[in-house]
Image (spheres, grey):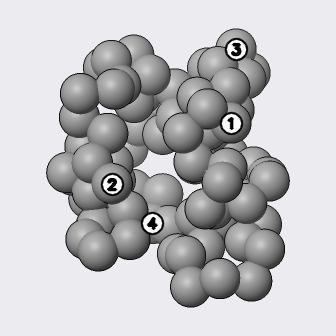
Amino acid sequence: MAAQPSEAEIDQGREVYGDFCVTCHGRDMVNPGGVTFDLRKFPKDDFERFRNAVLDGKPPAMPPWRDKLRDEDLKSLWAYVRSGG
């Protein structure tokens, strides 16, 4: 099982989320009412699924972020998602 993320990792992830995810997934991961997946319900133990969705996208709605995110951005974003917002 992965170690709990630090507050610094969560804060960094919150910034990455604000840059890339908030428009569709909503502030604090609270969806504004669209069809976007509720990230608060994402399985907290499935980093591979998360990684693949973020890097490869989920057509037709979610774009791939592979060329935009560094590995450390992805890790901090995962820390934020695991924190539940």
Mark closer to the chain start, 2 or 4: 4
Q: Amino acid at mark 1?
A: Gly
Q: Quadrant of the N terminus?
A: top left
Q: Which of the two discs, 1 and 2, sits closer to the camera? A: 2
Residue placed under numbered mark 1 in the picture: 18
| Front one among 84 and 62 | 62
Left-right relation of 21 to 55: right
Mark closer to the chain start, 3 or 4: 3
Left-right relation of 47 to 37: left
Residue placed under numbered mark 4 in the picture: 43
Dot 4 surroundings within 10 Å: few (below 14), some, or many (20 or more)? few
Dot 2 surroundings within 10 Å: few (below 14), some, or many (20 or more)? few
Q: Is residue 46 visible?
A: no
Q: Secondary structure at mark 1?
A: helix
Residue placed under numbered mark 3 in the picture: 8
Q: CA distance from mark 1 to mark 2?
A: 15 Å
| Whether label 1 touches label 2, CB < 8 Å | no
Looking at the image, which residue is at 25% across and 71% down? 59
